[in-house]
Image (tube, rainbow, N blue to C red):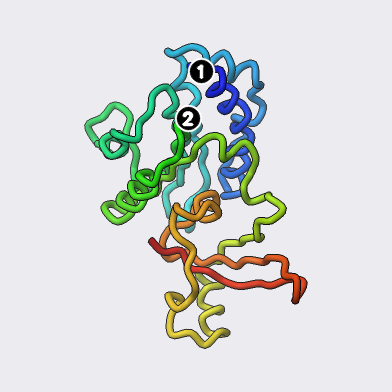
Amino acid sequence: MEADTIDQIIRSRPTILEVLKDRGYDVATYENTSPEEILKVATTSALIPLLKIVATKPGETADAPQERAIVLYWVENACRLRVENDTNALWDDEAPEHYNPETDTIIVMLAESFHPVFDLQSAKQWVTRKARISYFNMKNLISNPLHHVMQPQFKKLSATEVGELVKRLHLKSKKNLPHIIYHVDMAARVLGLVPGDVVHFRRGSETCGEVDGYRICVI
């Protein structure tokens, strides 16, 4: 594995853990892993699968199953041309390691340059089986994109908050809100939004000081 790829694995690791923690997942098991430990794993081909992160959080209701976020590292070889086959294999019940689209969210870390095929594949998986999968070039997670000084502050709204918003704004439906594009928009990807989710945002304005608004996630 190239030295640059190993460097990206080490430097992006705290960010992806922060992203998962912000989404409500328990990442305590991974927070004390040292860069030296990651380096040892990343430089040994047989150990690379051990880079995988599996974080959990309670279901949305008391009787709902536990939810998982799984971070996979597809970093040894470029996977753009085979991404559909590799992604479909994640849900194959006959595979030794497979995942459940109803409870599992998959995040794939990439060493190769990002390409629109990854946006298309994420959307296709959602439309086909309501599977939540996102792809990140590790360079984009050296720091948290949501913490950039020019990035608006986002907050995902609960179903109750969305209902109140629709009434307050006198909308026929939440679908009347402006759009944030699923997976294509980096903020939507980092937040883990899926189509139908609504976010509130605040951003600076030269004329008003601060402006806030709402977006609905769409494909």
Which class describes the residues within 10 Å of circle 2: few (<14), some (14-19), or many (20+)?
Answer: many
Give the side of residue 56 with respect to residue 121, left or right: right
Q: Secondary structure at mark 1?
A: loop
Q: Is residue 123 above or below residue 97?
A: below
Image position, residue 7 (x, y; %): 60, 23
Three-letter code for the amino acid on which mark 1 is drawn: Glu
Dot label at residue 111: 2
Q: Is 136 or 131 nearer to us in this picture? A: 136
Q: Is 65 or 76 nearer to us in this picture? A: 76
Three-letter code for the amino acid on which mark 2 is drawn: Ala
Residue at (28, 52) in percent of width and height: 129
Q: Is 163 or 1 nearer to us in this picture? A: 1
Residue at (45, 46) in percent of width and height: 66
Q: Is residue 55 above or below residue 74?
A: below
Residue 158 falls in image quadrant: bottom right
Q: Is residue 158 above or below residue 135?
A: below
Find out whether the residues at labels 2 and 1 contact each other: C-beta distance under 8 Å.
Answer: yes
Location of mark 1 (residue): 2
Q: What is the C-alpha distance between the residues marked 2 and 1?
A: 10 Å
Image position, residue 146 (x, y; %): 63, 51
